[in-house]
Amino acid sequence: MIQNLVLISFLSLSSTLAFAGDIQAAFETLKNSGVNYDPDGAVCEELERVRLDKIYPADKFVITGDVEYSTGGLTIGELDIIILDRQTNKVVLLEEVKCWKDFDGALLKAKSQKQRFEWNLEKSPRSLIFTSYDGRSYSAEQFMGNIPFNFISQQGGVAKGFTYEFDLNLREVHQLRMMLLKCQQNGECAKPH
C-alpha cells in the first residue's frame, strides 16, 4: 500500500496536462463536464480533476472535492480535491488549487487552509462534520494518517513553491473560463448540474 502511494505521488508530480497553452484543447476537454464555472477557481479545480483522472484509475479511486467541514456551526474550511481509495475508503491525497495573480498570497492561503484542516482534525476529530456537494459522506477517520497534501496553481507556480502547475497562464485560465461560461449560457455546452 505504501509503495503504491509513493508511486502515485511520484506520478502525480511528474504528470502534465498536455494543453501547452492551447486554450481550445482545454476548452474541448472541459466543455461537457457540467461544472458551474461561475466561481473563479472552478476552472483550475476541474483542470486538476482531469489531470488526476489520468493518474488515478476510476475503478480504484474516487476523485472528488469541494467538501466543507465544520464542528456543527459555521463552515471552518473547504477541501478542493480529495482522492479516496475505493477499496479502503481512505483518503490518499488532498489538494488545494489556487489560480491567483499573487503566487505568494495564493500559496500562503493554501498552506493556511492545510494547517487549519490538520489542526481541526487533530484537536477535534469527533466533532468534525463534512458536507459534500456530491452527497458523499465523510468521517474524520478517512483523513487519518500521513496523507500527501499538494498545492496546485497556474503556470509559474512551481518556481514559487507550488507542488504542480498547469501549462496555462492566468490570462489563459481567465479566457478559458469566459469561453466556458459563454458556451454554457448559449446552451452549446453542458449546463451545470
Image (tube, rainbow, N blue to C red):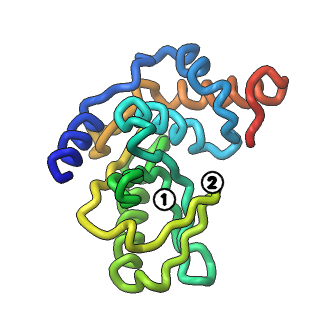
Q: In which image quadrant can residue 68 be found?
A: bottom right
Tell me if I can see residue 155 in this picture.
no
Element under disc 1: strand
User: Is 155 drawn above or below residue 143 in the view shown?
Assistant: above
104 and 69: which is toward the camera: 69
The dot on residue 134 is 2
45 and 1: which is toward the camera: 1
Q: Position of residue 156 (x, y in %)?
A: 35, 33
Q: Residue 32 vs residue 141: left or right?
A: right
Element under disc 2: loop
- Marks 2/1: CA distance? 13 Å
The residue tagged 1 is 79
Tell me if I can see residue 20 in this picture.
yes
153 and 171: which is toward the camera: 153
At horizontal 34% and vertical 52% (from top left) the residue drawn is 93
Q: Residue 14 vs residue 169: left or right?
A: left
| Front position among marks 2 and 1 | 2
User: Is 156 drawn above or below residue 77 in the view shown?
Assistant: above
